Image: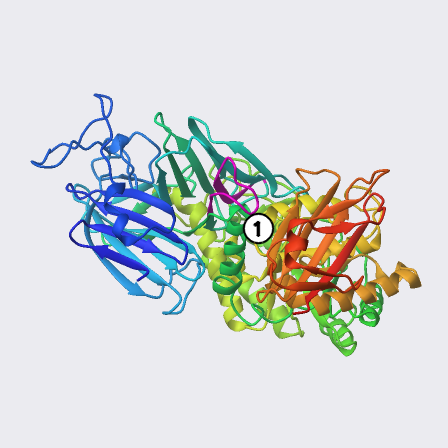
Amino acid sequence: MAIQFISATKIFKLDTNKTSYILQVNGYGYLLHHYYGAYIPDSEMDYLGYTVGHSSFSPGVPCWKNGEPYFSKDVSRMEYSCNGCGDFRGSALSIIRSTGTADTDIRYVSHKIYAGKPQIVGLPATYAAADEATTLEILCIDEASGAEVTLYYTVFEALGAMTRHVSVKNTSDKMMNIQRIFSTCVDFHDARDMDLIHLYGSWAMERKFERIPLMHGTQVISSKRGASSAMHNPFIAVCSHDATEEYGDAYGFNLVYSGNFVASAEMDTDGGARVLMGINPEGFNWKLEAGESFTTPEAVMVYSNEGIGGMSRIYHRLYRNNLCRGEWKNTRRPILINNWEATYFNFDEEKLYDIAKTASELGIEMFVMDDGWFGDRNTDKSGLGDWFVNESKLKGGLGKLVDRVNDLGMKFGIWFEPEMVSKDSNLFRAHPEWALQTPNRPMSIARAQYVLDMSRADVRDYLFDCISQVLDNANIAYIKWDFNRNLTEVGSALLDADRQGEVFHRYVLGLYELLERILNKYPHLIIEGCSSGGGRFDPAWLYYAPQSWTSDDTDAIERLDIQYGTSMCYPVSSMGSHVSACPNHQTNRTTPLTTRGHVAMSGTFGYELDLTKLTDEEKEIVKGQCDEYRKYYDLINKGDLYRLISPWKDRTRCAWSFVSEDKNEVLLTYVVIRGGIYDRHYVRLNGLDENRYYRNVQTGQVLSGKALMNAGICIQERLRDYESRMYHFISVN
């Protein structure tokens, strides 16, 4: 049974196929955390609880019970930590009650265990059929404030993943304020031999991998930009010092949320550690009237004793199958050409059509028209918010161009940046109050634009009507949804002063509501998320958009780092990746067209250059790349990813592979970053069946799974800087 409650000891045990998570209600009604890790038998749970030493600095509970050991929250492993009542470490929950004090103390009341998974209303989250998951709800109460707190745990038994979220209901007759509410809290008994992994970056260098030892004190990864951000991703992992890609303990934490977040790891004096993840409390204050409820976003927790790669593959399977939705979840998505780097704002109908026509001849399946098609938009200084077609560029209107492209046998996509408004726009002149702003303070401007207040229903209605007008009058198959600046002066003209601390979160809820409305009306639409590249690449977007633009940096060598880091928890099927022009527009580096294709194929494949300027030889290469991607699509997008050679550890080369679920097929990609005089390298594969034999389709050589994994494939060619090879293996058993 995936979740069980042992009434005699008041122990909860949550099991997946390979993991166990154990907590207990103690004699005072507090929830204690006992264990999270590899599976342990049911018969061996009782010894996990223990009493910790204490001092006057670690206060005990106010009312000691006969027969109960001395208990202090300050030195115990708490299941969901609260502020102000004796636990001095980081708090998961802090409520300011009607007295004005921020003391919170929750105790167990009851629980429910049932098949399946509840929907989180208004928020994206993983989903499951009744036979795919089991859910535990634990109801607690803070008697002094009347806050009723429900902790939700859902176990995906076959996948080895668990999700958590929390809701608070005000059962009193007085108002309270939620000051801090996190989605998950996990206390580790001993973290002195553990590392912290996180993904940092900036524009054009998103999700760089960093691994550092846990230290005494608190290490915090966060965003207060109003978006999950390019600077820090809402993902961390805690792993053993000796963990590699395939061996050792790895615990992943990922927040299904697109707004401000915090992920922290705090090591206390005795070497234990607390991991917290949830909405960033800075700038957050939620007023909860009598009878009202608040629900957090979902945190996804994954444990693997098969290393960092094992953790990643669990995330990939879960997100592909139980987070991504709709028609394009499993359907092959079209290979696309985007005109941005080919033309920027300088285009007309004929220029776009010429690129589309050439693309159709090369096997590309969708043309995407980027920024500049609407309003008075010839630079990035004006026009956002005026979502009507600029017929001086597109003579005859959008429908005419779309029909011409459709006649080529291609789908048509279009760029929007709905959440923004240009200072120089008809929309801002008519409705300046629709932008985020605070009283008596100048509005910060970035990229000559402001941010619309997505918490307002009238703003969302306007955007829905504008987008619908475009989609209803042309055969649009795809939207690239961009977001090119972060939030400042975060205030809403419609909310009272005591609710301004809710704007950040209400903004995100409003965004999700608009996306849901659009997808309900246009269920066949593909949405690709974008934020100056990968500035809002988070799991919440997978619920609405099966893919996101990974980075504006399209240089193939830079993308090795970016895509490697992104793959820590996000599947390849979610990564927008294109072949672009050379010299590259961001780095000025020149790389072979073949290498650019090999790297871009480890993502949702496409092109971002002027195809009309390619030589005949280059066009033949593009044709071959399109054919290859179609051939390998299922293997790349549904297979298991194995990171074989890290671009961070070995700055001379990089390698990864995809292995089909049945282990019959393997695709290996090898890229040289810096070549040498004596270049002969072995690449050891992983994830194969050691008892089978595999034929290298390119060379005809047949080797056993044992040989390929233990000795590896020998790359005997002398490859120069930035050259690459792709090898396809098929089982011959």
Residue 191 position, x and y percent, is 41, 33
318 left or right of 656 in image = left
Tell me what residue is drawn at x 44 percent, y 36 percent: 264
Near-viewer residue (262 or 352): 262
Residue 506 shown in magenta: no
Outermost residue to the bottom? 407
Q: Nearer the viewer, residue 120 or 373?
A: 120
Can the viewer see residue 461?
Answer: no
Q: Position of residue 133 (x, y in %)?
A: 37, 63
Which residue bears the numbered disc 1? 537
- The residue at the point 69 percent across, 63 percent down is 694
- Classify mark 1: helix, strand or loop: loop
**Residue 286 in picture, x, y percent from top left:** 34, 45
- Which residue corresponds to the image point at 52% horizontal and 72% vertical from the top-left? 521
Q: Residue furthest left?
A: 66
In this picture, is 34 found above or below 54? below
Please state if 253 lies on the left or on the right of 398 as rendered: left
> Which quadrant is home to the C terminus?
bottom right
Question: From the viewer's perspective, is residue 51 above or below residue 511?
Answer: above
- Report the side of 384 relative to 629 (left or right): left
Residue kind at label 1, given as amino acid type:
Phe
Q: Splitting the image into 4 quarters, where does residue 4 fall?
A: bottom left
* Viewer-side residue, 587 vs 21: 21
Query: Which range is magenta?
Result: 231-253
Position of the N terminus by quadrant: bottom left
Residue 107 in view:
yes
Q: Where residue 114 sits in the image (x, y, percent)?
A: 28, 64
